[in-house]
Image: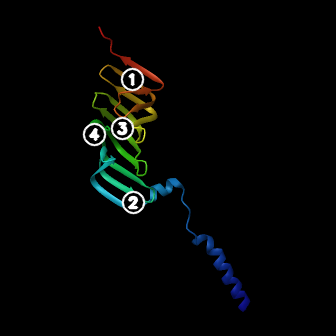
Amino acid sequence: MRSIGVVLLTVMLFGCEDKIKPSRLSGDEIADTAVPSQESWKATVVISDSGKVRAILKAGHISVYDDRMMTHMDREVTVDFYDTSGIHTSVLASREAWVNDRTKNLEARGDVVVKSDNGSVLVTEVLYWNNARRKVHTDEFVKITTPDEAIQGRGFESDETLRYYKVFKVSAESKSQQ
């Protein structure tokens, strides 16, 4: 009788082992379930390089994930960009944005609008800013309006001032000089 009890106990322990193990999450599920190490509301973050302000980010809500070295912003996200001399060049607005805390690269999503101080306006759904290259780009549909033209297409690359840009797969309207 004692050997039957040991066998039953062994079967029960090993039979339950799979039910007790925690499930593994995919990368997307981890991102959805990650807990921020810090949170702020109505916050401002200054990104500087060698003591010079390069960008000022503002958001209604900011979550910092130290373990992933990422910062998520949502609720009225705005980013003011400055050139190497500290002069304001443009402002970006979006529903949400992610900043890679290591590279300082930014990904803006949802109703993205960039207004350059030179009068250009860019509208898209997703826009990436590469901090090291000082460039913005997207593979999504874009519309850019300047004082002289309105261009739309799929795919875009520009300097952060929107002065020197490329639009891929273009359709355009131009104002003629008479």
Label 1: element kind: strand
Of callouts 1 and 4, which one flags the residue occurring earlier in the amino acid sequence?
4
Spatial CA distance of label 1 from label 3 is 16 Å
Question: Which residue, given by chain and number where applicable, does mark 3 sit on?
Answer: 112
Spatial CA distance of label 1 from label 4 is 29 Å
Label 3: element kind: strand
Spatial CA distance of label 2 from label 1 is 40 Å
Tell whether label 3 touches label 1 (CB within 8 Å).
no
Name of the residue lying farthest toward the top: 178
Of callouts 1 and 3, which one flags the residue occurring earlier in the amino acid sequence?
3
- The residue positioned 36% from the left and 55% from the top of the image is 63
Spatial CA distance of label 2 from label 3 is 24 Å
- The residue positioned 68% from the left and 81% from the top of the image is 10
Q: Mark 4 packing: few (<14 Cα in 10 Å), some, or many (20+)?
A: few
**Of 56 and 35, the residue lying toward us:** 56
Q: Quadrant of residue 6?
A: bottom right
Task: Please state which of the two labelled residues, at mark 1 or mark 4, is closer to the viewer.
Answer: 4
The amino acid beneath tag 3 is: Val
Question: Which residue, given by chain and number where applicable, does mark 4 sit on?
Answer: 86
Of callouts 2 and 3, which one flags the residue occurring earlier in the amino acid sequence?
2
Label 2: element kind: loop
